[in-house]
Each structure stands twice: as C-alpha cells, then as structure tokens.
Image (cartoon, rainbow, N blue to C red):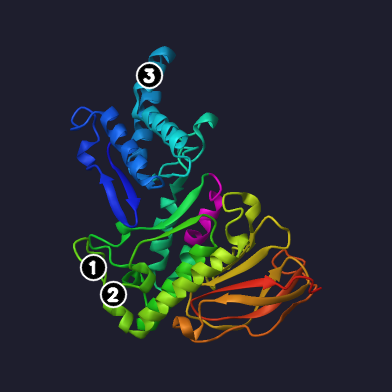
Amino acid sequence: MGLFSVFKKNRVIVSNDASEFDSKTSKKKNYEVMRDILELFSIYQKPVFRSHIVKHLIGKKRAESDNSLDKKILDDKFEKCEYYKQRELNKIIFSKFPDSLMIAEESSEWPLVSAPVHLGGLGFNFKWNMGWMNDMLEYMEKDSIYRKWHHNLITFSFLYAFSENFILPLSHDEVVYGKKSLLNKMPGDYWQKFANLRVLYGYMMTHPGKKLLFMGGEFAQFDEWKDQEDLDWHLLDYELHAKMKNYVKQLNHFYLNEPGLWELDHEQEGFHWIDPHNNQQSIIVFMRKGKKSDDYVISICNFTPEYYPNYKIGVPEPGTYREVFNSDLEEYGGSGKVNRGSLFADKSCWHNQPCHLEIEIPPLTTVILKKIINSE
C-alpha cells in the first residue's frame, strides 16, 4: 500500500518510502502492509494515521475509467485497484478501532474522499486542504502593499470549504528544503513578521475546518525544521517568541471555548460572509455559527499594517457586542490597540446586514466580536 505514517505523541511509528508504492517493486505485499498497519493500531489503540498516496490512487482509478470501455473489464480492474484496497482498509480499521483517525493528504478535486464507504466515499475522516495551504502561504509571502491584487487567495477556499471534512494544514512539508520557516516567509520588519504570523493563525482558527500546526510554529521558529536536531527552544528567551507561544496557547483555549468555531465546522450553516469584497484594504469579515442561533462570533482580519480607528462593519442584529479576542494585545507582541467596553449596533444596513457598528481595527490583526446575550 505504501507511503503511510502513523503518529503518536509526535513520533512517526511507521512510514514507507515513495519508491515502495508500486506493488510490483514493493518489498512487502499489500496484505503484509495492511497486516502491519492493523498490528500498529492494536498496539496504540487510537493513533492518527495519514495516507500520502491518495492522489496516486485516485489518478490510477481515473485513468482506468478513461481507458476502459467494457464495464465488466472496468469493474474487474477496479476490484484489484489500490483505490478499493484503501477503502477496504478504512472499513476494517473503523470496524476494529472506531475512535481512530484516518487522514488523507490529497489535492485533487475527486469527491467524497472523507465520506463513509457505505455512502460511496473513500472512507477517511478528514482530508488535508492543500489548496487552502498553498493559497494562504502564497498570499502571506507577498508584501502587504500587493495583497489587494491577490484578494481571491484568502476568499476562494470558502467556496469549497464544505465539500469535504477538511483539515487546514501548516505542515512540516512547508518548512523544509529551502522553503523557509513560517516566520521567515512573512514580509516586513521584525515586528511585522510576528504580526503577520499572528493574523495568519487567527484567520486559520476562525476559518472552517480542523487545524494542524507543525511543531516550532507555535513559538515562531526562525530556522527551517531540522529532523536530526531539537527545536530552537532557546528562542523562548526572546520576548516576541515567548509572546507568540502565549498567543497560540490563548488562541487554542479561545477556540475550544467557542462552539461557533467548531460545532458546524463541515456544514454551510456554520459560516456566513459579511464582507469578502474589500480587496483595497485587504480586510475580510465573516461569521462563524454554532448550533444555537445566538451562538456566533464575528471575525475581522486585517492583512495590512494600516490602522483603522473607525471601521464600519455589518452585524446581523441590534444590541451590544464586545471584543472577545484580539491578536494585537501587547501580551501577544502587538501594539495594544483594542476595542474596550461595549460596542453598540445601530439599526441601519451595512454589508447586507440589518445593523452595523464601528470598531477599531489594528494593523495586521484578527479581531473577534461576540454579541452580549439579551443585550437588545
């Protein structure tokens, strides 16, 4: 089967080299690989299992679909296809280890990768959103003055965000082989590099989909990841790195405490645009919603170093709102520009919403608002 990784406590338990993919040249037969995988699952009980080869499997299945005209021959081929072996493996794993996670690293448009096998899917729990990752890193590497001409890179992913059970990955693949660390990808001076990284993380946490941040990103490691060396923990002796670690910690806690950010992660009902169109100022505004009608947050992301003291945004209902998260806090390394106290919504339309309010938007910042319940 080839090219799998099983992770437990940040250790790779098993990984097959890409050269072993072809069953004709693989050192192990498919059934032997499947047996080894199932043995690992029995040892670790609840591992996270990532498959690297899904695109290859899908490409093989599609090629056979295109080249064969006889349905019976086509069906016979499919029965022997790696694609179907992967489906069977997923079925076996979930029948024996229902709490396991199966994750597909896959970038094609092939549908139902994360749908159950009995519904015609490939049977994975999640699919890495490679398109989001590539778009966002391309966007964030651009100097902020040019971002307005590439606004689609931060909005396009919302068009397909609910077609699969996506994970948003900032993985090891993007911080090795001369690609630079996440912090070093960011443009601007020393302060702006950290601010850019904070707004990226804030955007990522409020975007639909589960999250994956590779080790070292939580404290903004300057160097690329080195697989034979420890992380650069000494950087925590420096103020902005220590503050970035605190920021990621607080952002994680905030995420867990806000059901609107994860309850409807893979459903269209959990997301609503307020303003995706402001490319000139590189600002986007959207809502994330939970199962309860009043359980929502409003995320505002400013991808430039410009400060807006009186920025008007649309909100869905009148009442009082408050700022519940701000990546520009001084304790996170920011400039300390915050929205203090209550924010009162006026009953006049803006951004196709029935009400609006004015807020401060700090430079290179994610601001999150929430309505105070029973505030009307």
Q: Secondary structure at mark 3?
A: loop
The segment highlighted magenta reads 152-163
Amino acid on which the number 2 mark rests in the picture: Trp
Q: Nearer the viewer, residue 112 or 160?
A: 112
Q: Position of residue 154 (x, y in %)?
A: 49, 61
- Where, by quadrant of the figure, is residue 133 drawn? bottom left
Q: Nearer the viewer, residue 67 or 162?
A: 162
**CA distance separating discs 3 and 1:** 51 Å
Amino acid on which the number 1 mark rests in the picture: Asp
Dot 3 alpha-carbon crowd within 10 angstroms: few under 14, some 14 to 19, many 20 or more:
few
Amino acid on which the number 3 mark rests in the picture: Ser
The reply to whether residue 60 is visible in this rendering is: yes
Point out which mark residue 230 bears: 1
Q: Position of residue 66 (x, y in %)?
A: 39, 25
Marks 2 and 1 close (CB-CB < 8 Å): yes
The residue that disc 3 covers is 68
Q: Is residue 332 above or below residue 207?
A: below
Point out which mark residue 233 bears: 2
Q: Nearer the viewer, mark 2 or mark 3?
A: 2
Q: Secondary structure at mark 1?
A: loop
Dot 1 alpha-carbon crowd within 10 angstroms: few under 14, some 14 to 19, many 20 or more:
few
The residue shown at (38%, 21%) is: 79
Q: Position of residue 114 (x, y in %)?
A: 48, 41
The residue shown at (50%, 70%) is: 251
Q: Is residue 278 above or below residue 343?
A: above
- Where, by quadrant of the figure, is residue 169 drawn? bottom left
